[in-house]
Amino acid sequence: MGMWGERVEDVVYFMEPGYVLEGTPYQISIECTQLGEDNSLYLPPLSSAAHRDFLPSAALGYSSNRALLIISGSGIKEGVKIEKTVNLVDVAPTISYLLGISPPDNAEGRVLHEFLL
C-alpha cells in the first residue's frame, strides 16, 4: 500500500466512507447531517475531501483520493492512456529514469515504461 516500509506504525487504520476522525484516534464520530437513499450511511457535503484516513479507493461527494497524471516531453510517447492504476510512488522512479539518474534510495515505485519511447 505504499505505507513507508519500516517507518509505518504497528497498527494502520482506514475509515469507512461516512465516518470522520475528529481530534485524537479515540474520538471517532459520525455526522448524520445527510443520509443516503437507504438512510443507513452518512453522506458528507459534496465539497468534502477524501484524504487522511480513507483507502485510496474512497470517494466522498465530488472528491476522491484519485489523481490525474499527465506526462509530456522528450522520451515520452504521445497519446498513451493507461487503464490500470498508476501510483504516486511511480512518479519519482519514472522521472529519475528519464533524467538518467538513480531513483531516491527510499523510492518504492516502478518506472512507468508504458509512457516511454
Image (tube, rainbow, N blue to C red):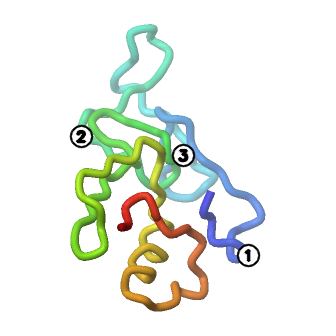
Q: Which corner quadrant holds the C terminus?
A: bottom left
| Residue 96 figure quarter | bottom left
The residue positioned 31% from the left and 51% from the top of the image is 80
Q: Which dot marks residue 6? A: 1
Name the side, left or right, on which 40 lies relative to 79.
right
What type is the residue that disc 2 sits on?
Ser
Residue 21, disc: none
Is residue 35 shown above or below 4?
above
- Upstream in sequence: badge 3 or badge 1: 1
Residue labelled with disc 3:
55
Q: Residue at x 27, y 36 (%)?
A: 62
- For the residues carrying marks 3 and 2, which lies nearer the camera in this image? 3
Instruction: Please name the amino acid that badge 1 sits on.
Output: Glu
Foreground pick, 80 / 64: 80
Q: Are marks 3 and 2 in contact (CB under 8 Å)?
A: no
Mark 2 secondary-structure assignment: loop
Query: Where in the figure is residue 83, as x and y percent of width and height?
Result: 42, 41
Residue at mark 3 to residue at mark 2: CA–CA distance: 18 Å
Cα distance in 3D space between marks 3 and 1: 20 Å
Q: Residues within 10 Å of mark 3 (few under 14, many from 20)?
A: some
- Residue 18: x and y in percent read 47, 32
